[in-house]
Structure formats: C-alpha cells, structure tokens
Amino acid sequence: MAESEYKFVPIAENLEEQPSVIVNGKAYKEDKELNDFLNDNGLNVDTDALKFDIYNNINLKKFDINESRVLVEINDFTQYINQEEIVPGSLHTMLTLVSKEQKQRKLNIADFGFVDLQSLVAEANLNIVEKNSHPLKPGEYIAFVKVVWKTKIKNEVASVIVPLGADVKKSFSVGLKETELYFYAAKRQIKSKVIYSFDEHYQTLKITSEEMLDFNPSKLFGDLKNKTANPGKLYKGFQKYIYPMIYSIIKVMPVKKNRIFFASDSRAEMGGNFEFLNYELMNQGFDDVHYVFNENQFVKKSLRTFLKFAWLTATSEYIFIEESHPMLEHVSIKHKVNVIQTWHAAGAFKTFGYTSMRLMAQDTSKMNFHRYYTNATVSSEAMVPIYSEAFDVDSDIIKPLGLARSDLFWNDMLQYERINNLKQEYDFLNTGKKVILFAPTFRGAGRKQAHYPFEYLDLKAIYEAFKDDYIFLIKVHFNTLNKINIPVIYSDFFYDVSEYRDINDLMLLSDIMITDYSSVSFEFALLNKPMLFFVPDLQDYVSTRGFYYHYDELVPGKIVDNSQELIQAIENKDFEEEKIPKFKDHFFTYQDGKSSKRIIDYFINKVDEDGNALDVEKN
C-alpha cells in the first residue's frame, strides 16, 4: 500500500485549531455538525485507519452535469488502501444522495465502474433513479461517493461516504444550473425543476428538486400534447353509438361520381401527402373536393361537423386518409366508396399497426382500425408485404405508387418558395451558416408517454465544436410531450423548431440530418445529403420494439452512440454516404416527382403513366 498522498494540513495559515476533516486532501477546521454527520455515515477518522485511507485518497478527476445526467469520475483509490482487511470481491463503490431533510433517506443512484486502470466512473440519470424508474423525488440532497465492503475479521458490512470536494464548484459559472425532470404515463405525469449547486458546508454537490406537476392526465386531457380536454363519456358514447346510427340514415344518399373527401383527425390544416394530392386534383380540374380536418381526435366536433362527415362519407366516391380515422372504424362503408390510405410515414423501420400489437400479444380480433381500407399507397414494392401485415389486409390492395409529399424534392420552384418562407419566419436561418437538423422520434409507448431524453445530447460539447460554422435545429416528433431547455449561453446556436409542422421543408435547407429510428431518414435520403444515426439507447430500444430489418445493416449513414462520436463524425465528414443509393432504391420504386399524379391517375382517372386505360376494379 502506498503512503497516503495527503496530510492533515490547515487550509488557512491563521487556523489555530488542528483540522479534523479532510475533503479530497484539503483539511477543514473542527465542525461538530459535519463530524456528527460523517460519524452517522460510518466515518471516524480517529479510530478507523481503513476508512480514513479510503476517505483521504478518493479524488475527483472529472465532474459533469448534462440536463438530468450527472457524471462523476474518481481515481482508483484501491491501490492506496490496505485490502488485507477486506473480503475479496466485496468492495463496492457507488454515487449516493443523502436527503438533507431526512438523513435516513439515502439513494444509491449509480455504480462506479472502471473505465481504465486509473479511473472509475459513475453516471446517473435523475429521471429514473427512484423506484419504477421514476424521477428524483422533491427535496434537498447532497451527493457523496459511498464505498461499501465486508470486513475479514468480523465479516460485517462497513461503509464510508466521501464528499465530491471543492472542485465541483468550478462547474457552476453562475453559481447553479437548472433543468427539468419528467415522467409520462397514461395515468401519471410528473414534472420537477432541479437546481444543481455547490454545498459550501458539506463541500459537495447539492441537488434541489422542486415538484411542478404530479397528476393523472387522463382525468383532465384526452390529448396531452395539445392539452385537449377529455370529451367525456356522453361525447364518446355519441361518437361510438349515435353517430353510426346517423350515418346509417344518411348512407341511403347516392355516391356522387368523382366526389373526393380528405379526412384527418390528426391535423388542423392542409399538409403532408394531402397537400400534394390536393394540388394535383386542382391541376387536373377536379372541383368536387371536400375536407374535414381536426387537430386530434379529442377535439370536440360540433353536431354540424358530425353531419357533414356522415354526408361526405356516404356520398364521396373517394376518401383519402393518412392514418386510421376513428369515425370510419365504427361504420359500414358503402361498397362504391373507396377509402384510400396514404399513410403519414414513409418506409418502415419499426413494426406498427397489427404487427406491433401481435408482438405484444394483444388480442386484435375485435379491432377494426385499418381493416376497412379499400386501398393503400406505399413507396415501393418492398413495402407491400409489410403494410399488408400491419393493416391486416390483402396485399393486392397495397399499391406501390409512390409517396405523394416526396414530389416536393423534384419541384424547384416550390422548394424555393418554401425556403424563402422559412427564412422569413425564422431570422436565424439567414446567418449564412450551415444547418444541422436534429430530428429524433419519441420514446415511450404511444402518445400519452411520448418524450425524448434530451440528456443524451451534450449541448456544451456540440456547441463548442460547431458554433462558428453551423446552427443546430431541433425538430422532435409532433407527439413529443417534453421540450428541450436551451441554456441562454447556447441560444445563438441551438433552435427548437418543433412547432413547425412539415419537416420536409426543414430538410431542404439542412446540410446534415441527425436522427435515430424515425422515418424521416427515408425522405432525407432522396436529397442525397449526409445523415448520422444518434442512438445511445440502441440495445434497449431494439429489445422493446420490433424492427422489420436489422437496424445496423439498414440505416443509410453512420451510427453513433454518444455526443463525442457525433462530433467526431461531423468533424471528419464520416457519414458513410455510400449507403444512401441502395437504401433509396429499396424504399422508393419511383424517384421522379410524379407520385401524386400517379396516385390520382390510378385511382380516379384509372389510367397508367402513359395514359392507357387500366382495368381497375375495387378490391
């Protein structure tokens, strides 16, 4: 055992009393409260040489806070202690929080593990440190390194806690840091404000958690994202039972030839595939075209809207939708009416629809979403069996005619217009700097749990690496419930544009896109621009979600699993762009900007690309 590096030395020359507390090698004068606290937690430097050696030889090498993540790196103190007193294999080192209000409440939030021969690292995510992966409970906490072992002589468990030391203070340029913790579930939503600071008395990190929200959202909201009130049992009963009766009466009205109806319960305005299909219809002179859009299915519809929807469902020859529509699931669609699913996403990474439900062993026998489609459009031949299984329909009705909204990428005039509109709306796009677009999908099982763990991003490191040449746009999935907290010092680089609905517009002016398991990579590939796939949780995500392909063999870009790898890939221009052509050809049979025309011609005009009549019968 090497001799202890540190001695009992006063930190100030005018200290007359011999100090009795050592924190990372610095000695402090007698403090009864602090000494009592240390004694209560297993340290008596006067009587226990082993504890003293552990306490005196743990030194902080690195400390970092990134949103809810706390990283602590210490030296390998074990080479300086007498391990002959310790049962082999029993030594365990962890990062521990002690409640200042309830000293008996101690929470081990992360284990230390070796990263090399000289260092041990612990990284804790405060979002998941409590039971059932809940965020840290409200209260004031102080952080310590806790070392536990079994003694050879008495075979008893012994322990000691060590403050992180004064170097922690250097991390707080303004005295403190703030972030938010969150938890989203169908019947519970938790949000807390967390303040990190330095505790002068205990010479360590202090964490203050203040509760902001803790409630059952299902009792208040139908749609959490837009805070749409739950419609209530009477409204739901009307939609499920009375509306079908109304429709059955209106259903006797005749179907009007070439009447076209666009219906969505997930958007309040024209956009996506609908926009390009509608433009093509107008261009071809169709004028009997109607629309009923709703921001989400929980926004209450008026009686007039119900009647209009029933009338259009009964009398339209063609109904275009972009995901399953709840008002079509409980009615019997007339044989002459064609319900055409254009789907809101391109390609297929993750399993969806009935495929994902069956993987979770759900009984789908009594469900009716998707099964009422007359036809569906997909981007390529390879997607036909996948969508057929997901919708639980015959593959014959799945038509690989292309993705309507991808026509944007072949329309130079429209691209110019969209880019100009974006630059007028967002001044920061006029800096002349290159653009990185960060567009991840959400985590969690469905809309009521949808969130993104922004602590994956090391904002400081990314900012310092690219602030001079780039701006960094953040566009999360529209279902994502939490928002990123951008520190003021980084606000000239990171910009949250999640409120902008159409991500394809943002793709046009982006030089690099960073995504994960999102379908946005399919369309970005059509632009032949570089992509990175930022997946710190790849193993966990793949194990809980089914995939149609092996992820690492499919993605058209380099996979990175932490911020440092992300930075290096951009700096080295290491994007693995050679994967893009094969990826595009697999997921897009047509790459010509004519998908909207192809879809309208096939289903409505019943002609092929050359204008020849098709023998198309309703399946």
Image: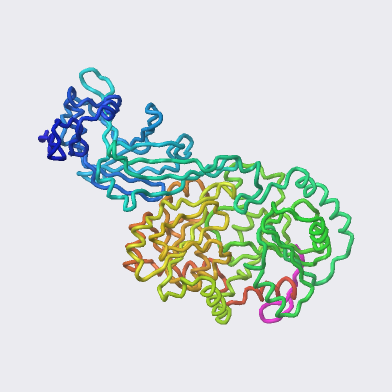
Residue drawn at (67%, 55%) of the image? 296
Of residues 225 and 517, the one nearer the viewer is: 225
Which quarter of the rendered picture does the N terminus lie within? top left
The answer to whether residue 74 is left or right of residue 455 is left
Of residues 446 and 343, the one nearer the viewer is: 446
Residue 145 in picture, x, y percent from top left: 29, 36
Of residues 602 and 112, the one nearer the viewer is: 112
Of residues 483 and 351, the one nearer the viewer is: 483
Which quarter of the rendered picture does the C terminus lie within? bottom right
Tell me: residue 130, above or below residue 539.
above
Instruction: Residue 616: say if magenta.
Output: yes
Q: Residue furthest left?
A: 3
Residue 353 in picture, x, y percent from top left: 62, 52
The answer to whether residue 558 is left or right of residue 14 is right
Tell me: residue 513, above or below residue 196.
below
Q: Quadrant of residue 144?
A: top left
Q: Which residues lie in the magenta part?
A: 606-619
